[in-house]
Amino acid sequence: MSDSARARARLERELRREVVIEPNPALGLIAMGGPNDPEPGLTIDDGVVVEMDGRPAADFDLIDRFIVDYGLDLTETAGAMSLNEVEIARMLVDIDVPRSELVRLASGLTPARLARVVSRLDPVEMMLALKKMRARNRPANQAHVTNRKESPVLLAADAAEAAIRGFAEIETTVGVSRMAPLNAIAILVGSQVGRPGVLTQCAVEERKNLELGMLGLTTYSETLSVYGTESCMIDGDDTPWSKALLASAYASRGIKVRFTSGTGSEALMTHSDGFSMLYLEARCLWLVRAAGSQGVQNGSISAVALPLSLPGGTKAILGENLIGAWLDLEVASGNDAVASHSAIRKTAKLMGQFLPGTDFVTSGYSVMPKRDNMFGGGNFDSDDLDEWTTIQRDWQVDAGIEPVNENEVLRVREEAARTIQALYRSLGFPPITDEEIRSAVYGYDSRDMPDRDRLADLEAADRVLSDGITGVSLARALDLAGQSGPAEAILGMQRLRVSGDYLQTSAIVEPGWAVVSAVNDPNEYRGPGTGYRLDGERWERLRRLPHQSEASTKAVSSRRESPAVVEIGDAIPGGPDDEVVIAVGPAFLSVVTETIGGLAHENVLTALVDGIEGEGASCRVVRVRRTSDVAFIGHDGAGLSGSGVGVGIQSKGTTVIHRADLQPLDNLELFGMAPLLTLDSYRAIGRNAAAHALGKRPSPVPTEIDNFARAKLIVQTTLLQALETGEVEPGAPATVIELRERGVVTEII
Amino acid sequence: MPRSKRETRIDGFDPASDYPLSTVRPDLVTTPSGRRLEELTLEAVRQGTVADDDLRATAETLRRQAAVARESRRHPLAANLERAADLAAISDHEILALYTALRPGRSTGTELEDWASRLEKELGAPQVAAFVREAAVAYRESGLLR
């Protein structure tokens, strides 16, 4: 433990719970550019690949072989591999080289080459390249919806909320595998109540996953994990061929498929074979493309903390997202599993995907509190929603979450809860009580949910599979229960499977059942003035936060009954030698009647007068009308004062003790922290002003400092000052004022 | 009477301009039993005229989607959708069994060849058959056969 108090304070920070390490390439603990990574290369002999990335064909593992047989476009390889790395890297950020040309180029580049080119870019170049290479024109986002009790009503309510917040996809999973059908049904129903067309999935073991899709209870799947080494693939009980067959099986039932991969998974499984994370991920991504998947969930995903323990880890993750997009894959770019304890660090990492925009900025934003996230996720959760929408507004960037009014959230949660209650009743499933509905609508997390009969729920879940309860069955049951709206929407989801339009790259379903994908809405970014820009209606929608205020002076102007002020007449310079003039701003006790700290102006005046008189000086109150600047208000007051000492006070409460012989912008004492001033402070200011007037040398009035006051109150400050300035009459002389009811003014000259 | 351009396209399909099928060419989209999208209504569900397992893509639709993918220069995706078209008419049960057979160490070379020849001869799935044969070669060379 350090002797330094500052070092100890840093040690206490959340960040320091995390371990950072030196690279250890032998264990695969190196983010990119590992010493064992092969030299990129491709040798073709008579139309046959005989060597790739330093490995002769005879030594190819399953992954090399699969990439060569089904992926690499041998008509492109010669041209592509002959370009040097920097040349290709420059093309990635060159707005005059179109995306399509780079996609064609990638089809001829080996995994080692892709990794090496990307590692030539710095983070801002990577972001520009990612913005250019994203497949779909408009970015979107995916939600996680789970809870520890696997409460169907809470799942449905959360799914409905996710849907109205604009998530294009919603993913759930299970605590107990047998619950899968019920969880899938809950988020299907909830999502369609929120917004018809939201795609849903339930991540479980592949076979069961496929069964749920075949029944029409899910519309997409991203459970197909691949790894960059053969031993990891085999550990995962799959081969590239079995995964690819699975992908075709999903597609044959009209289910959208996205593979999953990510840096660090091989090192975590201790089968990295000594290669860097980014190189292995480049192999994964090539495998994903070769298998015919339209897209990938990558960005380290559940291993994210491992690359983050290494130098360049965050950069490598952005690099892998970029390689995915470059290979023309839809990219759901991670940011789901907890990346860091530190809010600063995880937000900094997020910006790599958030600012350029990806097909799905997160591959699972936790719509509920992270405690209920069953994916080990919740990197960003329900508590962070306002931060997310505010950061979108700050940057004018669309990261796929819409701000929604709280009443609307409650309404849709209740509707979804009632719908799943009706569905359970209609199907003869264990009943959902009104108490459950109340808790699901208003509660924080599953701890607020009443316990259910788990055994009965599990039996119902089994019944879904044994009776073959399908998406159509759900529509029928809902219709019978009088819920024709949700029934229509669920039927609509089944109809999507008939046309298969959403099997194309980067497909999502917009309101009105319009399928939008990289085919009919491709990203054609070519620099400023092109591509997706957050403007027009969408910007209007994303920038209007429910809690925002009107930027109107009405919001801060007085609605309070305050004493009437009588203007006695023009103020004349000179008074008794012990006189202190209190000079108030033009709006004081007229259009403004309280300071920014909420003190009534008449009480502030009384405190100042009490302080001055208590110290044995006399005083006069004037209104300065020609300026709203506190220095000039105070200096004008000092100029009128018999002693040459004045107190200037703005309507918002900022105060200065001034003396006539000082420069206007100089002062005796300045009290800029208006929000922190109390009536006692104003009394003390009065006493000190009097002391200055009487020729004493008072110690300065102690003041509080709060560096957050400005961040909190700067808008009110601006608006109050606008009111003050609005009352300025250029060239008008100061007037002596008096309070009619309270008789604050004691001396009128 | 001269045929309009639209009419001449009724039987044709242009993968460059006919996506999304559901909105541009709904006339080409049917369920396996031949129902068109517009017939798949809640009313039809009420009447019981829509079978639960009928709401999915046909092999023909998947081949059209494969053509759209190929047109967009997404060749591996197109190949996947063509394999999907092969699988469209095969039962859930068979597909799950085939998937299991392709997992590491599950099948002998003969078993995979049996699958391939069934896919080709009985199940009308030549692309998947070829894919299984290619897998069998790779598995043999990598020691992944049972």
Image (cartoon, rainbow, N blue to C red):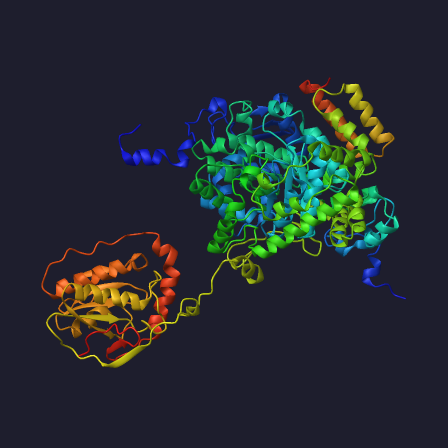
Q: Eyeballing the image, is A737 above or below A138?
A: below
Q: Position of residue A53 (x, y in %)?
A: 56, 28
Work out which residue is located at the far right of the displayed protein and give it. B1
Q: Is residue B27 left or right of residue A656?
A: right
Residue closer to the observer: A687 or A347: A687
Work out which residue is located at the far bottom of the displayed protein and give it. A569
- Residue occupying image coordinates x 25% and y 61%: A682
- Residue occupying image coordinates x 87% and y 45%: B33
Image quadrant occupied by the C terminus of chain A: bottom left
Q: Position of residue A299 (x, y in %)?
A: 54, 38
Q: Would you identify the image quadrant in which residue A668 lies?
A: bottom left
Q: Position of residue A265 (x, y in %)?
A: 55, 29
Q: Is residue A402 left or right of residue A428?
A: left
Q: Would you identify the image quadrant in which residue A184 lies?
A: top right
The answer to whether residue A72 is visible is no
Q: Position of residue A729 (x, y in %)?
A: 30, 78
Residue closer to the observer: A170 or B107: A170
Image quadrant occupied by the N terminus of chain A: top left
Q: Is residue A470 left or right of residue A548?
A: right
The answer to whether residue A642 is visible is yes
Residue closer to the observer: A147 or A287: A147
Residue closer to the observer: A107 or A171: A171
